Amino acid sequence: MSVINIIVADSHPVVVSGINEFLKSASDIRVVATYSDGVQALQAIRDLQPAVAVIALSLPKISGLDVLATVNRDQLATRILFYAAQANPRDIIAAMAEGAYGFLGKDSQPHELLHSIREIAAGRKCLPFELLAHAHQSRSPAPIPIEKLLTQREWKVMQLAAQGLSNKEIGRRLGMSAGTAKIHLYHIFQKVGVKSRSALATIAFHSSSSDVTATKSKFRRIMH
């Protein structure tokens, strides 16, 4: 059985200690190092190349979102799992849009951490529908008739981009090049009137059906 190497970063030593102690019970997960700020965490990602980085959304020096942005920019292989005692909807949506592989809230159970790490290490995202839906509802954006603005292909590109997939990943899912996916996104931004993926993610979730069952079904189809 292969072992999943991870790092943990949080400014509160008791939190780091608690996570580290709990993960000792998992024979397939190894905490290779722990850190107290974003700069240390980012350097560890570069040096140690862990499969997963479990980091707090709020970190000293540079934030968790800044760490994620740098990981994406430099095309580092480590996948980011965020957790936060309190997170505003803007941060949740931004983390999702920037490509976070997972997000755990303050009410998450310990077994959810284990499950998330294993799923993320396998390349699958763990973004709880309920958490995303709450973030979307809290933003309360104005209704936008997306179905009247976008082609069917643009709609699919938008939904995948809203889940944080890169242009390359979108292209792989839809059978197109990364360049073509980028062009589609440019057209989507122009039609919808946004300038960032986080703003697009807000609109994408808002444009989903208000029926919870239908929305969850659509979310699962996108993820798989």
Image: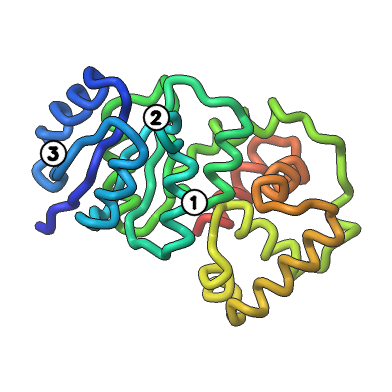
Q: Which residue is mark 1?
A: 69
For disc 3, the neighbor class at 10 Å (few under 14, some 14 to 19, many from 20) is few
Identify residue type, mark 2: Pro
In the image shown, does 31 or 37 lie closer to the viewer?
37
- Can you tell which quarter of the image residue 53 is in? top left
CA gap between label 2 and label 1 equals 16 Å
Q: Nearer the viewer, residue 83 or 109?
A: 83
Measured from the top left, where is residue 17 in percent x and y? 18, 24
- The quarter of the rendered structure image containing the N terminus is bottom left
For disc 3, the marked residue is 26
Q: Dot 2, how many residues are within 10 Å of its Cα: few (below 14), some (14-19), or many (20+)?
A: some
Q: Earlier in the sequence, mark 2 or mark 1?
A: 2
Q: Is disc 2 placed on a helix, strand or loop?
A: loop
Is 182 positioned to the left or the right of 220 in the image?
right
- Is residue 112 shown to the viewer in this render? no
> Which residue appears at 49% of the width and 37% of the height?
128
Task: Left or right? Give the position of 1 relative to 73.
Answer: left
Residue density around tag 1, few if under 14, some if 14–19, many if 20 or more, within 10 Å: some
